[in-house]
Every structure is written in structure tokens, then in C-alpha cells.
Image (cartoon, grey):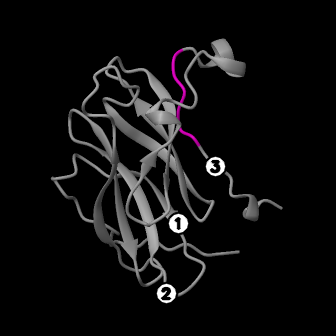
């Protein structure tokens, strides 16, 4: 058992350039002492959702922002993620990181998209930047007719 104690400090202070808040943090813990831990979170600036990053070189004691990580398609109003990218999950995959994210269309419709990063800097949207899963389609059918979101990837190494 672990004991938890409330800590009055915070990991990241408010940054008005990102938006109104930082939400749904996901942390990737490195397997060695040389590689920084990575944190990914999203924010909303009143118009669009975007994913931002931070990293820690001291195993999570302190964090420094690394900036914008991924945003929705800003040039195509019909894109499934035009209004932005919200909740996401990230896991190690093929010598890089795989992100499955909730894309929000201009209409408010939520679909899932995917992106991959193999250099710790540049994220490339997969599936030709189209959704990998849309509400009301495929095996989930009517159950997801309104919205699909809050993805979660399970790292197979952590499954018993």
C-alpha cells in the first residue's frame, strides 16, 4: 500500500497563451534515467482544443512546458478535427509514440483520430488525417450515434 499526502504545490502554472486550463494529462515514463518523462495535456482557448506537452528530467518532481504538440486541421472546415483535439491516450509503439485522440468537428461531432511520433518532436496524423473511428459506424453502431471519445490504449507490456 501507498500513502497519499496532499501537496499544496502544482506541476504547471496557468499559461494564458495555451487557453483556459490544462486537462487530462497523460504521462509517458521513460525506462532509463537519461530520457525525460513526457506529459501531454489539452487546453481550450475559447475556440479550439489543442494538445500541449511538458517534460521532466527529474522523474516528475518538476515539469517544463515544451509547447504545442498537435492541433486540429486549421485549413479545412470539414475536417473531423477542425475544432480541435481533446482527450487523448498515448502509448509506446513501433519505436515511437502512438496517440489516439478525440477530434472535434466544427459541428461538434466527436471522432477518434491517430498520430505517431518517432523523433520526440514531430507528430504525423495517421490514416491520411481522417478519423479511425466515427460515431454510429462499424460494430459499435447506434450505441455511439451521438459521440465517441475518451480513448485509452493499453500497453501490452503492462498487461498481466
Residue 7, x across and y down, in percent: 40, 73
Q: Secondary structure at mark 2?
A: loop
Q: Mark 1 vs mark 2: which is more N-terminal?
A: 1
Looking at the picture, does residue 154 appear above or below residue 80? below
Report crowding for label 2: few under 14, some 14 to 19, many 20 or more residues within 10 A (C-alpha): few
Please report the bounds of the magenta region as a residue range.
146-151
Looking at the picture, does residue 131 appear above or below residue 18? above
Which quadrant is the C terminus positioned in?
Answer: bottom right
User: Residue 60 bears which disc, if any?
Assistant: none
| Direction from residue 19 to residue 89 in the image, left or right | right
- Residue at (35% x, 66% y) in the render: 54
| Main SS, magenta residues | loop
Residue 135 is a magenta residue = no
Residue 115, x across and y down, in percent: 48, 46
- Residue at (47% x, 34% y) in the render: 128
Q: CA distance from mark 3 to mark 2?
A: 25 Å
Task: Name the one closer to the observer, 157 or 114.
Answer: 114
- Residue 61 quadrant: bottom left
Q: CA distance from mark 1 to mark 2?
A: 14 Å
User: Residue 28 bears which disc, if any?
Assistant: 1
Q: Which residue is mark 2?
A: 34
| Direction from residue 88 to residue 41 in the image, left or right | left
Q: CA distance from mark 3 to mark 1?
A: 12 Å
Looking at the picture, does residue 124 appear above or below residue 9? above
Residue farthest toward the bottom in the current orientation of the protein: 33
Q: Mark 3 vs mark 1: which is more N-terminal?
A: 1
Q: Which residue is mark 3?
A: 153
Report crowding for label 3: few under 14, some 14 to 19, many 20 or more residues within 10 A (C-alpha): few
Amino acid at each position: 500500500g501507498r500513502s497519499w499526502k496532499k501537496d499544496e504545490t502544482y506541476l504547471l502554472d496557468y499559461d494564458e497563451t495555451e487557453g483556459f486550463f490544462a486537462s487530462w494529462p497523460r504521462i509517458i515514463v521513460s525506462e532509463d534515467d537519461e530520457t525525460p518523462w513526457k506529459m501531454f495535456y489539452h487546453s481550450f482557448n475559447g475556440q479550439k482544443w489543442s494538445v500541449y506537452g511538458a517534460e521532466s528530467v527529474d522523474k516528475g518532481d518538476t515539469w517544463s512546458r515544451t509547447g504545442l504538440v498537435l492541433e486540429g486541421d486549421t485549413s479545412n472546415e470539414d475536417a473531423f478535427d477542425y475544432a480541435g483535439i481533446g482527450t487523448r491516450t498515448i502509448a509506446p509503439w513501433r519505436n515511437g509514440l502512438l496517440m489516439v485522440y478525440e477530434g472535434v468537428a466544427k459541428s461538434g461531432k466527436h471522432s477518434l483520430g491517430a498520430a505517431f511520433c518517432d523523433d520526440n518532436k514531430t507528430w504525423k496524423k495517421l490514416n491520411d488525417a481522417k478519423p479511425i473511428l466515427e460515431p454510429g459506424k462499424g460494430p459499435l453502431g447506434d450505441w455511439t450515434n451521438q459521440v465517441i471519445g475518451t480513448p485509452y490504449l493499453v500497453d501490452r507490456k503492462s498487461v498481466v
